[in-house]
Image (tube, grey):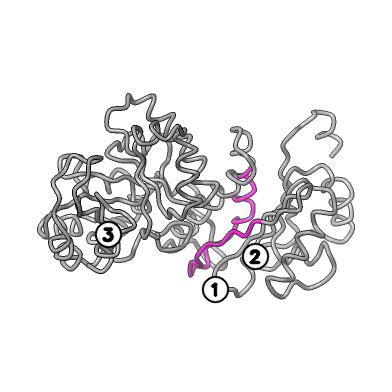
Amino acid sequence: AEEVGRRGLVQWVVDPVLVATSGAALADSAALNAIRTHLFPRATLLTPNLPEAEAILGYPIPDLPAMHTAVRELGALGPEWVLLKGGHHSLPQVTDLLFHASSGETTVLTAGRVETRNTHGTGCTLASAVAALLAQGRGMKEAVVEARRFLWGAVRFSAWAETGRGNGALLHAYQTHSPLHPALYAAPRLHPTLYMGQEVDYRLYAVTDDACIANQGQTLAGAVESAIRGGASIVQLRQKNAETGAMVRAALSVKEVCARHAVPLLINDRLDVALAVDADGVHVGQEDMPCALARKLLGPHKIVGVSVKTEAEAAAAERDGADYLGSGAVFATSTKDSSAIGVLRFSHVCHAVGIPVVGIGGLTAGNCGEAMRA
């Protein structure tokens, strides 16, 4: 604590490391008192798991309402932010609480559970990832959301590994070691690609259009923010004529908005841009990079969508590992250079495959019901 004060560190993540994931105690009462007195008041972010929070506060935290009470009491101990990790609970989803002490705001963060014993080091990994992202200039909410996404991917990818007895270690380099487990590339997709442990929600799919955004007097980031607040559950950045540098900058600005709301971001056509900004996936057309190659380059955990017009194209994309299809234009539209296929053909495409199909083109509040019923 004295060294932190002497060096004038401005972003400091404190992982109390009092109780391991396995349940083993890692510090005695004297160490706990010293940590509470000297470290908590200096912390930018405090990241206890539930057993650690119970040790700090001196009472059990049996359910979600108790977690909300506990995270506020932890905030009163001096840290600017508290991330109370709820993985030890038996809730259907892993539920964490991010609390901002000065505003009193609590953000609920959820993720799907992964059946695995390879969880050794999850707390250290999460705290380190948040610290690294804060050092890059990310805001706290964005850093926590990104770090949780990285951790969830590591837990999921490590689940198949045999790493000895007891709680096995995480494979932190999973994003570059996908070839260790070629079965994850199996096509067609045996399991849907997940986002933060949950199946991707394609029901309201927003695609950006620079001309429309400019005509409305909005910025790209502002338009995406409005779309998400209006209910968009996934966002695609589509800039057909953008230079690479400009598109990368645009993708980073949109990614910040999407990450803050825990909404997946896909990049249209440009696999290089998707890789450069670590987007959640890509959407490719029939004349773009083949779906199978996009899947190979992106890895098994990213989202890959394909534009199709016919049942044959749909079946081929599913065989090649697509997670979903975009089919249309369902109705005539001036924003996409594509002839309309109509509701009947769209219905045929939907019934030709077992993966989600998103209707695109000419959709309005008045006609989208027809496409949904297809």
Q: Is residue 99 left or right of residue 94?
A: right
x and y, in percent, of residue 373 in the image: 26, 69
| Label at residue 86 | 2
Q: Of residues 316 and 183, which is closer to you in this image?
A: 316
Amino acid bearing label 1: Pro
Q: Of residues 352 and 271, which is closer to you in this image?
A: 352
Q: Secondary structure at mark 2?
A: loop
Could you tell which of marks 2 and 3 lies nearer the N-terminus?
A: 2
Q: Residue at x 50, y 44 (%)?
A: 225
Q: Identify the magenta region.
A: 107-130
Task: State the CA–CA distance, disc 2 to disc 3.
Answer: 43 Å
| Label at residue 367 | 3
Labels 1, 3: front one: 3
Task: State the CA–CA distance, disc 1 to disc 3.
Answer: 37 Å
Q: Is residue 160 left or right of residue 95?
A: left
Q: Which residue is mark 1?
A: 92
Q: Is residue 301 depicted above or below 212 in this figure? A: below
